[in-house]
Image (cartoon, rainbow, N blue to C red):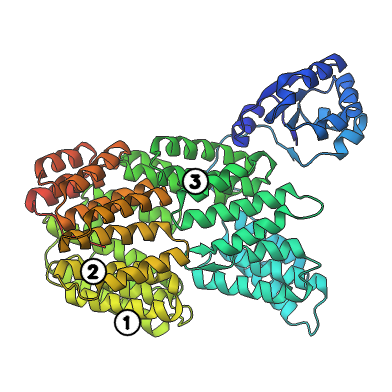
Amino acid sequence: MIVVADDAAWPLVRSAIGVEASGEFTLENGGDVVQMFDSPAAAGEGVVFLHIGEPAADAMLALNLNRDKLLSRKCRFLLRLRGLGAFQRFVREAPDCYSIRDAVALIEPQAAIDLEPSQEAEPDVEHRIANERSPAALLALGVELLMQGRLEGGYRALDRGIALLERKKRLSAHDRSILAALHYRRADCTIKQERRAHMQEALRVLGPVRDEFSEQYAMILSQRSDYYGSEIAVAREALDAAEQATPPNPDLVARQLIVLADAYLCRQDARGTREALGQAQMAWLATENRLFMHRLEAVLLITEGRWKEATHKLEDSLRQTAQAGPRLGIHSFALALSDLLIRQGELEAAVDAIASVESEQADELRLRVRCSQGEPDALRGLEDLADVIAGDGDLSRALARASAIAGWTRLAVRAGLLEGWSLDRMDAAIAVLVSRVAAVAPATPPWARIEADLLAADNLLARAGSELLAAEAAESALALARAGAPELIAVCVGRVAVAALRSGSLERLDALLGDAARAAEAHHLPGEAARIAGLRLWYAIQRGAGVGEAEQALDDAFARSGSVLVQAEVLLRVGRGAGRRDLVGRARRIYHALPWPEREGACLEALGMPQAARDRYEAFGLRLAALAVDRNPEPEPVDA
């Protein structure tokens, strides 16, 4: 690979590449080139960094004469040319060597990080969209706007491109390729159902000419998804096809590895994610893919419980994205960093991380901080849920927001900062939202309908004595999952099982847990499999039989997932439900090490140590949780 970067930009570029050099050489003449090829590093299997400046014409000529060695060695070479002048001279002096490159990256001089919106007048995008007649140009404009975070404009450009092509009576092969690309890009940053529909349409359109556009078809096919994201089997099939392509295409292989890694991560398979990312060579990826890979690595570190490393990764990535340009990428790193800082109890730092980010997600993070700090105005604002119910578009997002608001409301009532009637208002608002989803949400796939029933079940499980009603709502979700979304069987059974274990109604539980385990295995959901294994241990403890086998099965499930967060969550739930202090203690140690003070405090409450929990909350400014323990030391019921 050739990287064109001056000395000021190189340190940032090197950090972004993320590959350790097995050897590093500055080449000024032919003798330097000979010594480099004779070195142990050039005989190994790592990545060798070579640096050449514009005056080093002799070194360029020597590399050109020895280009076959660059191809035949087991190691890979990254040639860093010091600026545009060196690059232009290299192309002239070593054209044969330049022709065997895998990729070229030209890096602009280092710029300061800028999260602020541009103050320059924006061009009349609406005029461009309305008057553009070329679908290919609309595709390019739509992608440009999406990368800038201007989603509405991007969607309008892509939708117009789609409409122009759909008006044609006959589509050429090129038309089909453009139309498929428009649908593929239209799926970016949209809700699950719309994403699925656009991906299916892209495959349908491209199907008749798939042999002519095999790489494009494989890329779209690899992102055929269910509720959790790309299906593992399809992503693996696309990767196999990319690896067997002739001639070899390293960039396509790397992109398919990223798709596979993302699919594993969405299913809480940390081990699979780590393996896929380990195979992808970041230095050979386009900027957009490299930024996405940075974010995957950060989320994986969070999942593995390596939070300090994840924090540093996100901070570094935030700096690196400034040079790459896409504002959407910059903001996504800022949002992820803020979320992680909130979990670690670094509330002020979390707000600072998104100080210049204006979005609905950023506002929700700021609300989390204000509620955690027990700010009265923020808590009183929770009483009005009209804005949650009003959402007609992303119903899943409205349901998730309602769930979060319900949790804050319950904690505020427990802390004495809201009156008890706030719970009644919350129940009524949730009932209205669930009814609205049932009336307007798509029946195929029934994802939002299932989410609505699970929200109702969770709201009921949050109070003692409502287990039978919670089970009814969860059973409704389970029936929908069996009929049209089998990947959600396990998560629905989880709610049914918690309600059954809390109420002692265990007659059907063994069969249900077996169904859930098989569904989790069939849809590659190791995180859900671990949760089901945890519920089976709780069930075994309650029956007083098979406890040892259930404990071993749970440890095996933890190992398969590799997610420290799943492990801690399951240990706390089962430990509380089954009265096993040792399991709660294991969860506490995990949360303490991360650190996640809010969850560690919950463990201390479960261990009957309310004062210790209060002290932990207070130390991190979690005033709402501290007040709740003061006023009512009894923990809330075990949830699902």
For marks 3 and 1, the one nearer the N-term is: 3
Q: Is residue 399 visible?
A: no
Give the quadrant of the N terminus: top right
Which residue is at 65% across, 70% downward? 183
Point out residue 421 in the picture as x, y percentages from the top left corner. 13, 69
In the displayed structure, 290 sits above or below 446; it is above
Q: Amino acid at mark 2?
A: Asn
Which residue is at 46% across, 35% downward? 312
Which residue is at 17% across, 54% downward? 576
Q: Which residue is mark 2?
A: 459
Q: Secondary structure at mark 3?
A: helix
Point out residue 279 in the picture as x, y percentages from the top left corner. 61, 44
Q: Disc 2 versus disc 3: distance between alpha carbons?
A: 32 Å
Q: Disc 3 versus disc 1: distance between alpha carbons?
A: 36 Å
Q: Where is residue 577, by image quadrant?
A: bottom left
Q: Is residue 467 left or right of residue 342?
A: left
For marks 2 and 3, the one nearer the N-term is: 3
Rate crowding at label 3 as few (under 14), some (14 to 19) or many (20 or more) other CA atoms within 10 Å. many
Toward the viewer: 42 or 259? 42
Point out residue 5 in the picture as x, y percentages from the top left corner. 72, 31
Q: Which residue is mark 3?
A: 333
Toward the viewer: 242 or 11? 242
Q: Which residue is mark 1?
A: 435
Q: Where is residue 290, by image quadrant?
A: top right
Q: Where is residue 24, by image quadrant?
A: top right
Q: Secondary structure at mark 1?
A: helix
Q: Secondary structure at mark 2?
A: helix
Q: Is residue 576 left or right of residue 259?
A: left
Q: Disc 1 versus disc 2: distance between alpha carbons?
A: 15 Å
